[in-house]
Image (cartoon, rainbow, N blue to C red):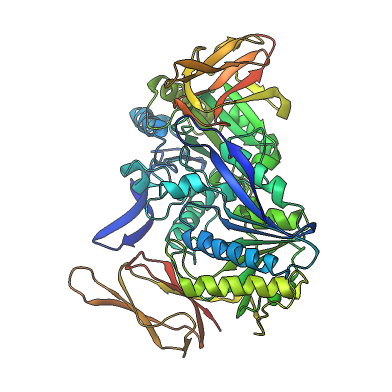
Amino acid sequence: MTKEILYKIDSLYRDQFRVTGYTFGEGEKALCVVGSIRGNEIQQIYTCAHLIRTLKKLEEEGKIVPGKQILVIPSCNPYSMNIEKRFWPTDNTDINRMFPGYDMGETTQRIAAGIFDRVKDYANGIQLASFYMPGEFMPHVRMMQTGFENIELAKEFGLPYVVRRHTRPYDTTTLNYNWQIWETNAFSLYTTGTDHIDREGAQLGLEAILSFMTRRGMLKDGFVNRLESQVVEDVDLVTARAGKAGIFERYVRTGQTVQKGQLLACILSPYDGEALEEIMAPVKGTVFFASDQPLTYSSTAVFKLIP
Amino acid sequence: MIKTVAAVELPVDEILQIRKKRIEPKQGNTGKRISIVTGIHGDELEGQYVCHQVIRRIESEINNLTGIVDVYPAMNPLGIDSVTRGIPGFDLDMNRIFPGNSDGTMTEYIASEIIRDLEGSDLCIDIHASNIYLTEIPQIRINELHQDKLLSLAKYLNVDLVWIHSNATVLESTLAYSLNSRNTPTLVVEMGVGMRITKEYGDQLTEGILQVMKELGMWKGAAGPVRRPMISRAVDEVEFVNAPKAGIFVQTASHGQYLHRGEEIGQIIDPLEGKVRARIRSEAGGVLFTIREYPVVDEGSLIARILKREEPYVPAL
């Protein structure tokens, strides 16, 4: 293992900003794993830290296939994480909306360019992603539909679901999208949680990455998830929405199978506790996403079901 | 007449409303409609004064109005009220969610209702005020895809600069892009600085809005003469100056002034060591149309933008 500073900039009053990478093996650039890009992605840095510890051990045991190089970047944004801010401290911009970056541009464009320059030549790229909707997800691998995506590869993580995301305009500046445009097989790996530690979720994420690495010929005698992944198009997910705003009282969890018409949650009046709305399952299916917010706005997606 | 464009309940005893004022002609309605929009970013306030002035001017000469004027002063009311650029509670830039989705989240729903309401206007003007970091001279920004339709209208708005961007740098999820791609001509105005009102700029734009209404055939009243703006068409006409080092930026040049090649714009100083970390100079002759307002800079922070020209800009009427 070699530890290397991949990108750095000096600050006026803070310590130097550094993006650090850990490289295992030598040779063909087989896989790059990126942990947190935003300052609240604690679960992502935690999962990456376990991955680095595991790969270090596997390398010592000679289990990394010769000729394969793996780069792991636990955090692209320690500055934001250290002050509990989600985005860049000075101007609140999101590094994950700056790819492929611009080395003569503004600060986060430069950071994105500096990182992208180091990660763009890898055959496979995994970002430990977080979702903008606060809540629980079923663990899954997501690929963006760019025309270059290879869904079959995503099944090699052995997670229950592979989701194909239909690209929206704002996706085009993300790491995942640009990786694919630069011919890297890019995957976003979602376990559970973002701003808190979930040990089980991290273990699941770690095993999924090891499974992928084994199946792609990077690890000898590695761990393999034998689960058959189900491919889901994001447009086929069925949304159950809160029509009213108020206190969100939830009765089901992710992964649970629900019947059409089953009560999923109630919206309660925050003043007198009256039920303002009962949210029923619109179809029979599996709960893929469930909001975990105590209060909800109206017209808000609070569940997504796989029919 | 005040109309509600979109309304959604908030969790505890409050309704969020996006409202507009509609001014209709007393007589001779040509059916033309102009929409004045501002407040998508809660920290950009320059448009507040413009909305007030436009309404006041039109209502004082209402018999000269021959079309419909819709004024939307607060697209992001929660942001304006809480000194927040994005939509509070969502940590979301409202100008990255258009055209929205009527079946989407609360914010996507609001965005889609806004588009629905604005679509079909003969002209929409979306007034921005840069951000808290940069000060801008009054200018219009146009996507090159839509320049044929927009440039002729932009010239009447009494701004100092029309900047035609290459398509690659224009974000598709903005209000302006969404409306222009739906054949509703939309001009984006950038002027002044975040969290402040520059009355002089507001007055300047107000005259421009009245003049463009005249041009559209919906206003017969008074409108001041308009400036002939500088027009930037090519990518290499604008020089971007970024901070080479982190520090505290102190401006030495004046905003809007003509800079000769090599002339100093400002310095990045180090208050801990009492040293000058960098002297920032213009690499080309031109007009300083963007200047850093917020002193703290990181490496890469934008310090200035210069429109390369042979001679100073004198606003000709």
Residue A303 against residue A59 in the figure, above or below = below
Outermost residue toward the front in this view:
A60
Q: Nearer the viewer, residue A300 or B209?
A: A300
Image coords of residue B129 (percent x, y): 46, 32
Q: Residue furthest bottom?
A: A259
Q: Residue at x 56, y 21 (%)?
A: B289
Q: How many marks?
A: 0
Is residue A234 visible in the rendered structure shown here?
Answer: no
From the viewer's side, name the closer residue of B213 and A300: A300
Q: Decide if residue A31 is in sight here.
A: yes
Q: Quadrant of the N terminus of chain B?
A: top left
- Residue B260, compared with residue B152, is above or below; it is above
Identify which residue is drawn at 74% across, 60% down: A25
When asked about the image quadrant of residue A147, the answer is: bottom right
Establish if B259 lies above or below B200: above
Residue B179's spot in the image, x, y percent?
58, 47
Q: Quadrant of the C terminus of chain B?
A: top right
Q: Is residue B4 left or right of residue A210?
A: left
For the view shown, which residue lies furthest in the left direction? A272
Res. A236 image quadrant: bottom right
Q: Residue B108: x percent and y percent?
A: 48, 59
Residue A3 percent across, percent down from the top left: 64, 50
Which sits in the foreground, A69 or B269?
Answer: A69
Res A151 → quadrant: bottom right
In the drawing, does residue B114 fall left or right of residue A18? left
